[in-house]
Image (tube, rainbow, N blue to C red):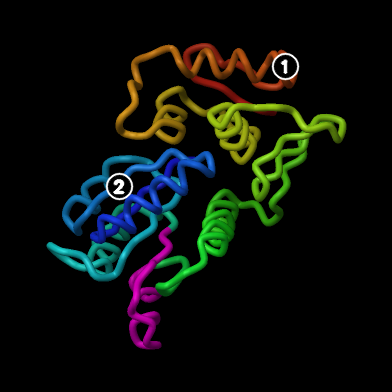
Amino acid sequence: MRLLVIEDDPLLRHSLTEGLREEQYAVDAAADGPEGLAKASEAGYDAIILDGMLPGFDGWELLLRLRREKRTPVLMLTARDAVPDRIRGLDAGADDYLTKPFDFEELLARLRALIRRSSGGGSSTVEIGEIAIDTATKLVRQDEQVVALTPREYRLVEYLALKRGCVVSRTELYEHLFDENEDTLSNLLDVHVSNVRKKLGAAFISTRRGHGYCIE
């Protein structure tokens, strides 16, 4: 899953970015309103963490502009905890609201819930035959035995599982699995697909020639 963190405080932005990467997310970051809106508009993020007070224009204005073209799930993260501020954020199109200071584990749980809701899922576990993908613990089990996947392999499995039955293009997979600093012209995706098939079975991920990949 690919996230965008829009936060002007450099220390918090770095902390969030590194913490989320440790949780197996691909993460991009922006430091102000114009940069954040540009990235949010151009890329297909699975969720956005948005600070309220930003240089250029604030998070509420960014959200209003973004909602004219995209429905990307947005978690507002701000020190302004007054009820009118929360109402303003939700009315502008925020999907959730968390005030600073916050607990990182709660942030992760809220992000997982946002992503599940946006993909139409209600449970944190996706079951595909004898394979179970737990989006809360980031573990994959086959016949109740944990299968050792790398972080990138897990993200591939989770994304395709949440899109089960749909053909996902290579372009979309690169957009959601890799951050802006990685080379999208490499054959990394093919390598990860091959490794997942070796671990979970050759038929687990289907190839649609000229279209992409699918978990049926």
- What is the number of the mark on residue 29? 2
Q: Quadrant location of the C terminus?
A: top right
Q: Position of residue 192 (x, y in %)?
A: 55, 19
Mark 1 crowd level (few <14, some 14–19, many ≥20, 10 Å Cα): few
Q: Residue shown at 25%/50% (left/top)?
A: 30
Residue 74: name its quadrant.
Answer: bottom left
Q: Residue shown at 26%/66% (left/top)?
A: 59
Determine whether 130 is above or below 209 in the image: below
Residue 198: name its quadrant.
Answer: top right
Q: From the image, tell me which residue sits under label 1.
A: 203
Q: What amino acid is found at the position of numbered circle 1 in the picture? A: Ala
Mark before the other along the chain sequence, 2 or 1: 2
Q: What amino acid is found at the position of numbered circle 2 in the picture? A: Ala
Of badges 2 and 1, the one in the foreground is 2
Determine whether 196 is above or below 89 in the image: above
Q: Where is residue 171 in the image (x, y as percent from the top left)?
A: 40, 25
- Outermost residue to the front: 11
- What is the number of the mark on residue 174? none
Q: What element carries label 1?
A: loop
Q: Position of residue 43 (x, y in %)?
A: 32, 40
Residues 95 and 109: in front is 109
Q: Position of residue 111 (x, y in %)?
A: 52, 56
Residue range (magenta): 74-93
- Outermost residue to the right: 143
Q: Residue shown at 71%/13% (left/top)?
A: 202
Magenta region includes residue 90:
yes
Magenta region includes residue 97:
no
Determine whether 213 is above or below 85 in the image: above
Q: How far apart are marks 2 and 1 (CA)?
A: 36 Å
Q: Is mark 2 on a helix, strand or loop?
A: strand
